[in-house]
Image: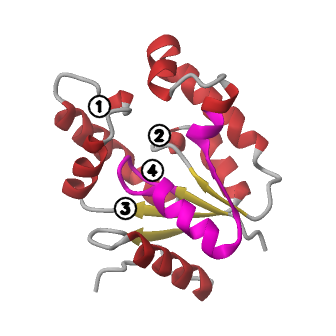
Amino acid sequence: MNSNIVLIGFMGCGKSSIGRRLAKRLGHEFLDTDDLIIAHAQGTSISELFANDGEERFRERESAELRELVEAKDIVLATGGGAILREENRALLHRIGRIVWLHADPETLFERASRNRKRPLLDVENPRSTFNALLESRLPIYESAADIQVDATGLPHEQTVDEIIRVLAVGDVPKASSGAS
């Protein structure tokens, strides 16, 4: 069975931070689609790519990176929050590995996302309104794409990693799993 793990979720859910820890714990390589895109764009930031080329071109770059990872082995992949928007990407993600949806309550997500000034989709006049609309539109897509769900609300990163490993070890698990008891 494919040992790759793909982390999906909205901005601020901790895909990169948790993904690094998870990869280290499993002895896997950690990859982040945003980092791969930046590397292939000669260091141009995600914000600059959005500003210069638009979201659609960015999503094309994202799809290209995912196509390159279909044959990868022993990786933990953190995706951008919008990677699941394209049906092609959802199919690619399933080919890459088990999809874990990291989620948290909206207040936690917004607080975390707001700390990062490099979020082009929140660089707007009313970031909270944009955040809420994006989150609401993406929640059903995350849910349908995920093999496993892990609620990271209130959990430290290491405890979230423990929960992901626990849920993955169970094998055929229900989609809803929460680390909060």
Q: Which residue is denoted by mark 3 in the rendering?
A: 103
Q: Is residue 48 visible?
A: yes
Viewer-nearest of discs 1 and 3:
1
Q: Which residue is denoted by mark 2 in the rendering?
A: 82
Mark 4 near mark 3, Cβ–Cβ under 8 Å?
no
**Amino acid found under the numbered disc labelled 2:** Gly
Q: Which residue is denoted by mark 4 in the rendering?
A: 141
**Amino acid found under the numbered disc labelled 1:** Leu
Report the Cα–Cα distance between label 4 and label 1: 20 Å
Report the Cα–Cα distance between label 1 and label 2: 13 Å
Residue 26 percent coordinates (x, y): 66, 74
Residue 138 percent coordinates (x, y): 38, 46
Viewer-nearest of discs 2 and 4:
2
Q: In what element is the residue under mark 3?
A: strand
Q: Which residue is denoted by mark 1 in the rendering?
A: 122
Asked whether, in this view, residue 144 is left or right of residue 181, the answer is right
Q: Is residue 87 visible?
A: no
Q: In what element is the residue under mark 1?
A: helix
Residue 142 percent coordinates (x, y): 45, 54
Report the Cα–Cα distance between label 2 and label 3: 14 Å
Asked whether, in this view, residue 114 is left or right of residue 10, the answer is left
Question: Which of the two discs, 1 and 2, labels the residue nearer the N terminus?
Answer: 2
> Does 179 appear above or below 135?
below
Label 4: how many Cα within 10 Å (few below 14, some 14–19, many 20+): some
Q: Could you tell me which residue is drawn at 61 percent across and 25 percent down?
A: 43
